[in-house]
Image (spheres, rainbow, N blue to C red):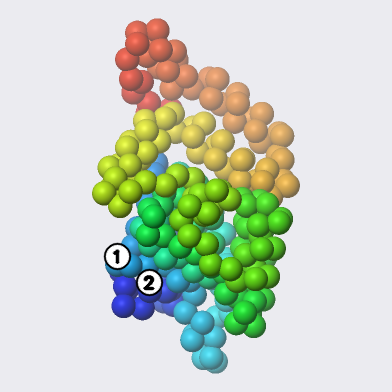
């Protein structure tokens, strides 16, 4: 996000661009980790609600559908939360698999205070990631949380200093990219589905069998025995 003067809010054109990028990334099997970063004081302030006054702009549900696509991304995703994150920007973070923050981060969800009913996918992510009580707290009061509280309730998966942020992002990215692609992507997908109450046991069983027959499993076993890093290919 590179519109810091406008708190990195996302308008309909931005969402279209993001959707195109998601399509490209999903089709490139070499991409195993995707990172969301922002310039300036803010990470993202969500949907440009000024767009809602236009007869041609899509509903805020379009923002929600785009966040659903972020959640369903094939690669593992990391939100690098260097500053304030508000409104739909909080849902962008929750749609990611990991959320690294700094003490400069803060968050709040102003939708109810602004008179806007939030979309289904975001409500589901709030409840599945943070729990019902915290979801009610954030939506119904519009309370602002600092970085320490964001970490405590599970909004952030970890908290590091501003100086450590880039190194930690790189280290986590490298750790994830070194995993075997088949289970990395499959387990991510099904954990997200289970969080939504959808357990596809047959599809999981097929994924287990595919991994058991893969060249990567054999390579992983050899690497473990030889005490060296595995060289996975996704085959």
* Side of 221 where 111 appears, left or right: right
* Side of 4 where 218 appears, left or right: right
User: Residue 216: percent from the left, percent from the top?
Assistant: 43, 22
Image quarter of residue 186: top right
User: Residue 9: percent from the left, percent from the top?
Assistant: 42, 74
Dot 1 surroundings within 10 Å: few (below 14), some, or many (20 or more)?
A: some
Q: CA distance from mark 1 to mark 2?
A: 8 Å
Residue 34 shows in the view: no
Q: Secondary structure at mark 2?
A: loop
| 83 versus 58 height, above or below | above
Circles 1 and 2, Cβ within 8 Å, touching? The answer is yes
Q: Quadrant of the N terminus?
A: bottom left
Q: Which residue is mark 2?
A: 8
Q: Residue at x 40, y 7 (%)?
A: 225
Dot 2 surroundings within 10 Å: few (below 14), some, or many (20 or more)?
A: many
Residue 133 shows in the view: yes
Q: Residue at x 30, y 52 (%)?
A: 162
Q: Secondary structure at mark 1?
A: loop
For the view shown, which residue lies furthest in the top direction?
A: 225
Instruction: Compare residues 222 and 159 and report the one nearer the observer.
Output: 159
| 181 versus 107 height, above or below | above
Q: Residue at x 37, y 59 (%)?
A: 104
Q: Which residue is mark 1?
A: 39
Q: Residue at x 33, y 42 (%)?
A: 168
């Amino acid at each position: 996000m590179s519109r810091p003067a406008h708190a990195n809010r996302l308008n309909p054109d931005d969402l279209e661009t993001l959707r195109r990028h998601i399509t490209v990334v999903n089709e490139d099997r070499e991409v195993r980790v995707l990172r969301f970063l922002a310039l300036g004081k803010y990470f993202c302030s969500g949907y440009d609600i000024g767009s809602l006054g236009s007869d041609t702009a899509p509903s805020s549900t379009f923002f929600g559908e785009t966040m659903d696509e972020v959640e369903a991304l094939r690669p593992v995703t990391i939100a690098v939360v260097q500053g304030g994150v508000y409104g739909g920007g909080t849902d962008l973070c929750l749609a990611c698999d990991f959320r690294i923050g700094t003490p400069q981060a803060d968050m709040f969800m102003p939708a109810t205070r602004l008179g806007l009913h939030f979309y289904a996918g975001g409500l589901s992510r709030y409840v599945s990631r943070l729990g019902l009580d915290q979801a009610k707290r954030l939506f119904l009061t519009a309370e602002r949380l600092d970085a320490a509280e964001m970490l405590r309730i599970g909004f952030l998966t970890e908290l590091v200093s501003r100086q450590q942020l880039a190194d930690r992002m790189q280290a986590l990215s490298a750790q994830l990219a070194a995993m075997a692609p088949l289970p990395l992507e499959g387990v991510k997908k099904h954990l997200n589905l289970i969080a939504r109450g959808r357990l596809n046991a047959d599809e999981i069983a097929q994924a287990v069998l595919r991994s058991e027959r893969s060249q990567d499993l054999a390579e992983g076993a050899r690497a473990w025995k030889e005490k060296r890093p595995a060289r996975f290919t996704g085959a």
